[in-house]
Amino acid sequence: MRGRRHPIKKRQFIGFVLCSSVLFAQSIISLPASFHADFRQTITSEQKKQIVYQGKIDFSSPDRFKWRYTVPTKKEVCVDSKKLLVVDHDLEQVSSYIIDKALNLSAILKGAKLHRKSVYIAKYRDKYYTIQVNSRQELSRIAYRDDLDNNVLIVFSRMKYGKKEIPADQMKCDYPERYDWVGG
């Protein structure tokens, strides 16, 4: 249904993407040149209301991401170090944002400390991030509190690490020309 919006605000969604992008920077938690995975993202408000997103993610070194949301809405989010593009296929809308906040993408993971087996804790700009790896030392979960005091949990499954970067043209969001552009 065109024009229908979900209860998660655009600012909150962009904050999630930026914060999660920060977590993939170089650190003691080793990441490959690329990876593909399924993800399940649960956002829980202070009032215990939840929204669950699901989809697939591609990561390519050094800082490119392509999130393909399939549930509850069809959306693509493409991120590089300078720009964030959100394609909402349900609304037939494209939003482009310049990433101008001075986030140090490597700082969060560089400061990550082993908390207990396979679980790391990082503090960055007065926020705490919990990062978990699986038995193969692959990224498994990320949890943090966003700027709107929501608890965010991202769980990765079917993780496939790659030895080569994904070509830049495969990391771009695709959309028809007829989609509306919304300034960011």
Image (cartoon, rainbow, N blue to C red):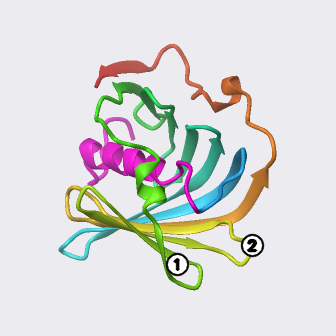
Q: Amino acid at mark 1?
A: Val
Q: Residue at x 45, y 38 (%)?
A: 90
Q: Position of residue 114 (x, y in %)?
A: 51, 77
Q: Amino acid at mark 2?
A: Arg
Q: Position of residue 35 (x, y in %)?
A: 70, 50
Above or below, 53 relative to 76? below
Mark drawn on residue 136: 2
User: What secondary structure is marked by label 2?
Assistant: loop
- Residue 26 marker: none
- Quick one: SS at disc 1? strand
Q: Is residue 11 magenta?
A: yes
Q: Nearer the viewer, residue 12 or 63?
A: 63
Q: Residue furthest top?
A: 177
Residue 131 as seen in the image, left or right of residue 182? right
Q: Is residue 162 above or below residue 130?
A: above
2 relative to 48 in the view: left or right: right
Q: Which residue is mark 1?
A: 119
Q: Is residue 152 visible?
A: no
- Residue 34, percent from left and from top: 71, 45
The quadrant of the picture occupied by the C terminus is top left
Q: Residues within 10 Å of mark 2 (few under 14, many from 20)?
A: few
Residues under labels 1 and 2: Cα distance? Answer: 13 Å
User: Which residue occupies 39% across, 41% down?
Assistant: 1
Q: Which residues are magenta?
A: 1-28
User: Which comes before the other along the chain, label 1 or label 2?
Assistant: 1
Provide residue 112's location: percent of width, then percent of height: 46, 66
Asked if 106 appears above or below 79 in the picture, the reply is below
Residue under the point 62% across and 51% down: 56
Do the residues bearing badges 1 and 2 touch, measured as CB atoms within 8 Å? no
- Give neighbour class at mark 1: few <14, some 14-19, many 20+ (Cα, 10 Å): some
